[in-house]
Image: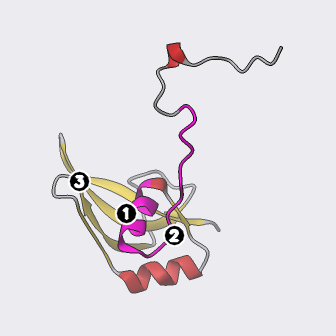
Amino acid sequence: MAVKIRLTRGGRKKRPYYRVIVTDVRNARDSEYIDKLGTYDPFKKEFLVNEEKVAYWLNQGALVSDTVRRNLAKKGLVPEIKRQSSQLNVPKKDRKKNTDD
């Protein structure tokens, strides 16, 4: 069974609040979870996790979502991954097809 550390949404309309959870990769976003590791409030930019539980699940082979990885890297719990900036911020109409003539 593959498990993933990811966010599940809570809060009210236009005021999200997230829990950092461990769940099976096949489960829906807000369905049942195995373990709660912490919380994330995007308005306060507050990311609180139990570092011992995170280390345990990472040692067990848990995968990490992009958003959680970025926040864990800020805390120094996982290595930061550099994103390729080739065409991420280029508008679609300005992208050129790779034509080697």
Residue 20 image-quadrant placement: bottom left
Per the image, the residue denoted by label 2 is 79
Residue 98 image-quadrant placement: top right
**Other residues around mark 2 within 10 Å, as few (<14) / some (14–19) / many (≥20):** few
Q: Is residue 44 left or right of residue 6?
A: left
Identified by mark 2, the residue type is Pro
Identified by mark 1, the residue type is Asn
3 or 2: tag closer to the N-terminus: 3
In three-dimensional space, the C-alpha distance between marks 1 and 2, rounded to whole angstroms, equals: 11 Å
Asked if residue 47 is among those painted magenta in the image, a careful observer would answer no
In three-dimensional space, the C-alpha distance between marks 3 and 2, rounded to whole angstroms, equals: 22 Å
3 or 1: tag closer to the N-terminus: 3
Per the image, the residue denoted by label 3 is 42
Asked if residue 82 is among those painted magenta in the image, a careful observer would answer yes
Q: Is mark 2 on a helix, strand or loop?
A: loop
**Residue 39 location in percent, x, y?**
27, 67
Per the image, the residue denoted by label 1 is 71
Whether residue 25 can be seen here: yes
Span highlighted in magenta in the image: 67-87
